[in-house]
Amino acid sequence: MAFSGPDAIDQAIKVGLDLDGSPIPEKMLTLYKEVMEKENLRKRTGVKKSMRNRIVRTGSKHFDQSSLDQRLKEAGWDGLSSKEIGFFFG
């Protein structure tokens, strides 16, 4: 089974297979599902904040620090914080 795109991880988890086709251990799936159930119950604070967090987390894999910082600012968000720089680019 081939997985690609932004939903690849969710699709693989749903069928219980890693991206290489190997089975995900049941204890891992159980813990993941338990944590995600709790997360689904958590009240959200705002879409734009979540969007920015996703952009930083994923964008750090595709852009260098300076480019991502500039793109965030151009889009109207705060630039990268020192904590984000240390975590994603350190």
Image: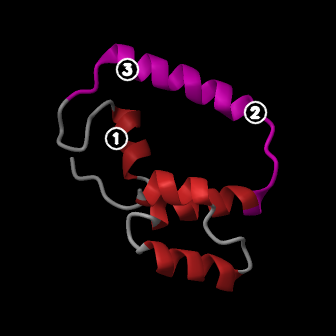
Q: SS for tag 3?
A: helix
Q: Residues within 10 Å of mark 2 (few under 14, many from 20)?
A: few
Camera-side residue: 75 or 86? 86
First along the sequence among labels 1 and 3? 1
- Residues marked 3 and 2 touching at CB (< 8 Å): no
**Residue 78, horizontal then vertical, whole percent:** 71, 71
Q: Nearer the viewer, residue 82 or 2?
A: 82
The foreground one among 42 and 26 is 42
Q: Compare residues 1 and 68 and report the one nearer the observer.
A: 68
- Distance between mark 3 and mark 2 Cα atoms: 21 Å
* Figure quadrant of the C terminus: bottom left
Q: Is residue 78 left or right of residue 43?
A: left
Q: Residue furthest top?
A: 27
Q: In the drawing, what numbered circle is on residue 12? A: 1
Check disc 1: other Cα within 10 Å, few if <14, some if 14-19, many if 20+: many
Element type at mark 1: helix
Is residue 46 highlighted in magenta? yes
Q: What residue is shown with label 2?
A: 42
Q: Is residue 6 left or right of residue 46?
A: left
Question: Which residue: 66% across, 32% down?
Answer: 39
User: Disc 1 and disc 3: Cα gap in Å?
Assistant: 13 Å
Q: Which residues are magenta?
A: 23-48
Residue name at image x 65 percent, y 72 percent: 79
